[in-house]
Amino acid sequence: MVEKEGYLQKAKIADGGKKLRKNWSTSWIVLSSRKLEFYKESKQQALSSMKTGHKPESVDLCGAHIEWAKEKSSRKNVFQITTVSGNEFLLQSDIDFIILDWFHAIKNAIDRLPKD
Ligand code: I3P
């Protein structure tokens, strides 16, 4: 069940604990109770790719951490999600209420889940 969806700026900065070169891009993001999904494209393209069974990048929120990450970027309003598997994502919006809503929605989802 979808809890929240919308566009944010996203940069994946680590994969399985291995640092990646930061590369910001706009992503259509879908939050459900256990996971976040990142679509590279617009919502419309995301919807049609779902129909064809094309898999988006999916983030397991079980045991994940979320924290503000002021020091990780020159941009404002950046927070980081770290998964149990060692993937790290930065999410950002210039619009304060949008990023605050996302932070709290994801934090609530994580807090409701078992830690392992
Ligand atoms: C990076 C790019 C990012 C920037 C990052 C740069 O350069 O400008 O936007 O992050 O800064 O290294 P490149 O495209 O050459 O990889 P922010 O926008 O988040 O500041 P960083 O190295 O300080 O993370």
Image: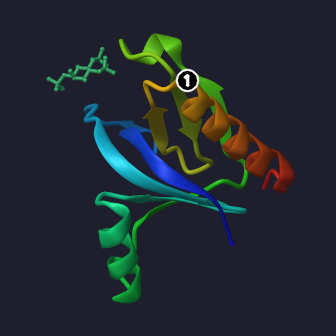
Q: Give the quarter of the image for residue 114.
A: bottom right
Q: Position of residue 6 (x, y in %)?
A: 49, 52
Q: Residue at x 46, y 39 (%)?
A: 89
Q: Which residue is drawn at 61% across and 40% down?
A: 102
Residue 39 appears in the figure: yes
Q: Where is residue 96 in the image (x, y as percent from the top left)?
A: 55, 23
Q: Give the quarter of the image for residue 23.
A: top left
Callout 1 amino acid: Asp
Label 1 sits on residue: 96
In what quadrant does ligand 1 lie?
Answer: top left
Residue 15 appears in the figure: no
> In the shown orientation, is residue 14 left or right of residue 77?
left
Q: How is the image coloured?
A: rainbow
Q: Quadrant where the N terminus lies?
A: bottom right
Q: Tag count in the figure?
A: 1
Compared to 52, does 26 lie above or below? above
Mark 1 falls on what kind of element? helix
Residue extending furthest bottom? 52
Q: Give the quarter of the image for residue 75.
A: top left
Q: Which residue is drawn at 47% across and 35% down?
A: 91
Crowdedness of circle 1 by 10 Å Cα count: few (<14), some, many (20+)? few
Q: Where is residue 2 in the image (x, y as percent from the top left)?
A: 64, 67
Q: Quadrant where the C terminus lies?
A: bottom right
Compared to 27, does 77 lie above or below? above
Q: Residue at x 39, y 76 (%)?
A: 47
> In the shown orientation, is residue 53 left or right of residue 2?
left
Compared to 30, does 106 lie above or below? above
